[in-house]
Amino acid sequence: MISTPKAQNIPPEHADPELDALVREIIGRVADKWTMLILETLEEHGRLRFTRLGQLVGDISQKMLTKTVRQMEADGLVVRTVYPVIPPRVDYELTDMGRSLSAAFCGVWDWAEQHREAIMEARRVFEGRGEMG
Amino acid sequence: MISTPKAQNIPPEHADPELDALVREIIGRVADKWTMLILETLEEHGRLRFTRLGQLVGDISQKMLTKTVRQMEADGLVVRTVYPVIPPRVDYELTDMGRSLSAAFCGVWDWAEQHREAIMEARRVFEGRGEMG
DNA sequence: CTGGATCCTTTTCGATACTG
DNA sequence: CAGTATCGAAAAGGATCCAG
């Protein structure tokens, strides 16, 4: 690990180490492939059942779907509604906070779509220079 | 893995499976904790040397810093400048594309800062309900 | 100083089997 | 249907040593 000597000239607004650590932790959870995909799917399709959500997300294992959606529920991004019926039925839906995060991620999705060709080209150039494996 | 039967009513603009896969792959790479932190650090501080970049990013090992920054270079997000001096000096700087991605992520950083209290509260409530380990 | 190479631990993830 | 439990493969990540 790289040593951080004294954190010298940090601007006052970024000075609080605990707050910064919390924001980092949140980013670490939310800036996740599956979280983003599930967020987008629920934003687009609204309330969904477990299996249907998995189908629409795409290549996600049931294990990761369960885990991610639970974490999102714990963070207040989705609400989980269990119907006491047989066979069981569980619906997932974004909260207002979940929708606001989805909106915040819109810029990243747009960026990815708009720059996909430039990225492919950059990779070709990099490959051609013979660097990396 | 959850089976995706036929992908029935997908809107035409999201129909291309190859394009969608590519955008997904890009999201998978940029929606990464280290990538976001390095992006932010370079956006805020401008051109930086390897060690200094690591210090400013924070708790990152040299291995992950090297790996992430190489990947970002391959994708055209940063330029790496090697000075033929002893001891060696290598500078990292965002490209225009890197800066545009940083801008796209701004909304997510703002979201994390603005909702940190709501998230903590949601976690307390969830914990109190006794769900999850 | 900037990493590459190596070893080792931890975490992630998928596949499978099983339950209410 | 909506999970939980478990196993093993694979990837992420850290620590250390070494070279140009």
Image (tube, coloured by chain):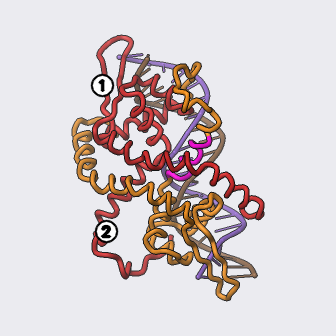
Chain colours: A orange, B red, C brown, D purple
The residue positioned 37% from the left and 40% from the top of the image is: B71
Q: Position of residue C16 (x, y in %)?
A: 58, 72
Q: Residues within 10 Å of mark 1 (few under 14, many from 20)?
A: few
User: Is residue B133 among the parts visible in the rendering?
Assistant: no
Q: Amino acid at mark 2?
A: Pro
The residue positioned 53% from the left and 76% from the top of the image is: A47
The tag earlier along the polypeptide, 2 or 1, is 2
First to last magenta residue range? A22-31
Q: Secondary structure at mark 1?
A: strand
Q: Position of residue B58 (x, y in %)?
A: 54, 31
Quadrant for residue B6, please give it. Answer: bottom left
Q: Nearer the viewer, residue A120 or B42?
A: B42
Mark 2 and mark 1 in contact? Answer it, CB < 8 Å.
no
Counting every numbered tag in the picture gives 2
Quadrant for residue C2, please give it. Answer: top left
The residue positioned 57% from the left and 73% from the top of the image is: A92
How far is the residue under mark 2 from the one under mark 1?
A: 37 Å
Could you say which disc has been placed on residue B17 in the image? 2
